[in-house]
Amino acid sequence: MKIEKQNIEPTAFELVKIPAGEIHLNDDRIKKKWSVNINEFYLSKYLVTQAFYFNVTGQSPSYFKGDNKPVESVSWIDAVQFCNQISLKEGLNPCYRIIGEGDKIEFDKDENGYRLPSEAEWQYACQANTNSIRYSELPEIAWYKENALNGTHDVGLKKPNEWGLYDMLGNVWEWCSDIYDEEVYGAYRIFRGGGWADEERSVMATNRRRSHPRAFKIDDLGFRIAKNVN
C-alpha cells in the first residue's frame, strides 16, 4: 500500500485528543494482568522530531541526523526535561520536579503542563479501539529491521492508526512516565513500541522494556508528549 508523504513542519507539533476508556495490560515476566481506566488526554500526533527538540532545548543529540527524523539518543531524564521546558515556554505548570541530577523525580500527574504518557495511555492510544498487537500490517505502519535500512526515517511516512497517530510502532521506541518495577529494578523506566533495529516479533503494542532513566541513551529510543485535558 502506498502512503502519501505528510507535509510536516519540522519544529511544529500537533496534539490528538484521545477518548476515555479502559486498557488491559500484561506482564509475562511476572505473569500479571491488570486493567487501567484511562481519562481523556492529548497525545502528540508524531514522535518528537529533531528540529522540534532543538527548537526547545538548543541540543542535537541524535545519531541519525535529519530535521523530521525522530529525536533519539535521549535519556528518560532528557525527555522529561524537554516536557518541562516546553511547558514553561507556553506558560504552563511543569509536571516534573527533578531533584539533584535526576536521582529523584516528583511527578504531578494533575498539572496542566506537558508530560510523557503513562504506559497504559501509550498502549491504549496505540491500539486505538482494537485489542490487537498491531493496528495494521506491520510493513504499512512501521519502520523495523526488514524495511528500515539500518536507521530512522522521517516521521509520518507510514500509515497512522485509527486515531491519527503516526509511528506508534517502529522507527524508535518511546519513553513512558512509569517506573517498571521499583522493588526489582529501582528507578528503571518503561519504553514501548519497538524500533528500526527490531525484528517483527518485537514490534508490538504489548511489548514492554525498561532501562535506567539517566544513563540509558540509544539510537532507537525517543519519545512523544502527552498532556491532560484541563
Image (spheres, rainbow, N blue to C red):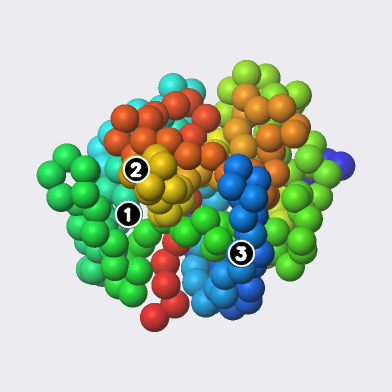
Check disc 2 and report the residue beneath it.
Answer: 186
Q: Nearer the viewer, mark 3 or mark 1?
A: 3
Residue 152 found in image quarter: top right
Residue drawn at x 75%, y 32% is 200
Return the disc, 2 or 3, that comes first in the chain's sequence.
3
Residue drawn at x 25%, y 38% is 58
Where does the C terminus fall, quadrant-wise?
A: bottom left
- Amino acid found under the numbered disc labelled 3: Trp
Q: Secondary structure at mark 3?
A: strand
Where does the N terminus fall, quadrant-wise?
A: top right
- Amino acid found under the numbered disc labelled 2: Gly
Residue 69: image location, x then y, percent: 52, 35
Q: Secondary structure at mark 2?
A: loop
Check disc 3 and report the residue beneath it.
Answer: 34
Residue drawn at x 45%, y 48% is 180
Q: Are marks 1 and 2 in contact (CB under 8 Å)?
A: no
- Residue 97, above or below 17: above
Question: Horizontally, is 3 left or right of 126 in the view?
Answer: right
Residue 147: image location, x then y, percent: 74, 26
- Residue 119, above or below 110: above
- Residue 151, above or below 156: above
Q: Is residue 193 in view from this perspective?
A: no
Residue 78 found in image quarter: top left
CA–CA distance in space, label 1 to label 2:
23 Å
Return the disc, 1 or 2, that comes first in the chain's sequence.
1
Check disc 1 and report the residue beneath it.
Answer: 83
